[in-house]
Image (cartoon, rainbow, N blue to C red):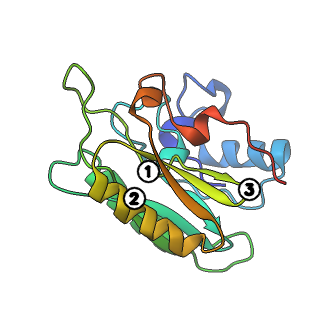
Amino acid sequence: MLPPRQCLLNPNRNPAWNQDEAVATAALETAIGAKAVLWLGDGLLNDHTDGHVDNLARFVAPGVVACPIAWGRNDPNAEVYDATARDLSGMTDATGRKLRVLRIPSPGLVLDEDERPIPASHMNFLIANGAVVVPTYGDDEAARFACEALATAFPDREIIPLPSKAILTGGGSFHCISQQEPA
């Protein structure tokens, strides 16, 4: 699993873990049977969830993790994306296989109605039967590049881009609002 420290080790979420990775890792291994806990750093700017991973990094195949790369200038999360990719490139999965990192173009700087950056991410896609539903935020070129990159990871699925800014105002996107179960 890929938990961001900013989220899972935040005292407002798991105070008993005392911001201790070893304690948290042991708890996750016991509670959910995690075979490998691959700690990431920070989540996206202004993410009210303290940096949920589904906006930052996603397993897309065994040994393959997708994470964003900044699109355009002024992406407030460029450093977070690059740090995440660097961290992932030095990690191995539960079988000991070195992770391969697939960079997905970000939507770039997306602002709310008050002109503040919001944590928009193409990473909050939903993997469904035969399809991948990808959140988009008004930049058609960024969305097209993100969908093309995701198509390389999911060649047997239709890639469906859909506007998601309205959903994001309530927090998250398609992955967050679904309760997916393996088929």
x, y percent for residue 54: 55, 46
Q: Are marks 2 and 1 in contact (CB under 8 Å)?
A: yes
> Which badge, 2 or 3, is on the more N-terminal residue?
2
- Tell me residue 44's x, y (percent): 38, 41
- The first of marks 2 and 1 along the sequence is 2
In the picture of the structure, the residue carrying the numbered disc 3 is 129
Q: Earlier in the sequence, mark 1 or mark 3?
A: 1
Q: Quadrant of residue 93?
A: bottom right
Q: Label 2, on which residue?
A: 68
- Discs 2/3, front: 3
Give me the disc on residue 66.
Answer: none
Task: Report, in whole angstroms, how far the alpha carbon at label 2 lies from the one at label 3.
Answer: 24 Å
Is residue 121 shown left or right of residue 34?
left
The amino acid type, in three-letter code, at marker 2 is: Pro
Using the image, tell me which numbered label, if any, was put on residue 122.
Answer: 1
Location of residue 146 (image quadrant): bottom left
Mark 3 secondary-structure assignment: loop
Which callout, 1 or 3, points to the residue nearer the camera?
3
Q: Amino acid at mark 3?
A: Asn
Q: Residue at x 75, y 45 (%)?
A: 28
Does residue 141 sit above or below 100 in this rendering?
above
Look at the picture and state if 71 lies above or below 148: above
Query: Where residue 107 appears, x then y in whole percent?
Result: 32, 50
Considering every residue shown, the one lying at the far left of the view is 73
Image quarter where the N terminus lies is bottom right
- For residue 90, say whether it is visible: no
Q: 144 or 26, which lies in front?
A: 144
The image shows residue 6 at horizontal and vertical percentages of 47, 39
Name the residue type under label 1: His
Residue 49 at least partly seen: yes
Q: Is residue 64 above or below residue 16?
A: below
